[in-house]
Amino acid sequence: MIVFDLECINGHVFEGWFDDREDLDRQQAQGLLQCPVCDSFSVSPKLSAVAIRKSASPAPAGSGREMATQAQMEVMAELTEKMSRYVENNYEDVGASFAKEALEMHYGAKAFKQIRGTTTKQEEKTLEKEGVPVMKMPIFSKDDEDLN
């Protein structure tokens, strides 16, 4: 996987994860890239900064794989929390009715809207079988919730 910085025509910058550059180019050509902020399909990759090592001095002790892994974990945790907050603020919570609502929208019985909620494993299998696109995300507890 490779991460590219993307920018929509309205200047919103976000990340996209792709198998390789050809995957990015293919999705862009097919009009599959969409800004998560304004829903614009006019999206293109941004130029990324290149890291250049300035010296050949050895890396500090303890900066090996474990620090890189810790830094990556922190970045992923921050990104996951931002995505979770975005969904929480922009998608309607339909709770345990998620599968029913998603299927009704998928088959045109209800108008499309952005929804979030919960499913059982069986409901997940049904949604997958019916071709309903679903993305699972962790749920972050609020400070006043006493959850593990």
Image: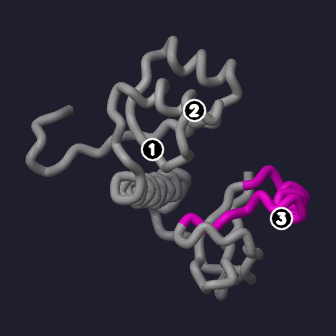
Marks 1/3: CA–CA distance: 25 Å
Marks 1/2: CA–CA distance: 15 Å
The coloring applied to the image is one colour
| Residue 29 place in picture, x, y as percent | 89, 64
Whether residue 143 appears in magenta in the rendering, the answer is: no
85 above or below 119? below
Residue at x 8%, y 47% (from the top left corner): 144
Nearer-N-terminus badge (1/3): 3
Task: Count neighbours of disc 2 (C-alpha within 10 A) and say few if under 14, some if 14 to 19, many if 20 or more.
Answer: few
Circle 3 SS class: helix
For discs 1 and 2, the disc positioned in front in the rendered view: 2
Report if residue 86 is visible in the image.
Answer: yes
Per the rendered image, the range of residues in magenta is 18-36
For discs 3 and 2, the disc positioned in front in the rendered view: 2
Residue at x 20%, y 32% (from the top left corner): 148
| Residue 35 place in picture, x, y as percent | 62, 68
Residue under circle 1?
A: 115
Residue under circle 3?
A: 28
Q: Are marks 1 and 3 in contact (CB under 8 Å)?
A: no
Marks 3/2: CA–CA distance: 31 Å
Whether residue 22 appears in magenta in the rendering, the answer is: yes
Residue at x 52%, y 70% (from the top left corner): 37
Q: Which mark is residue 109?
A: 2
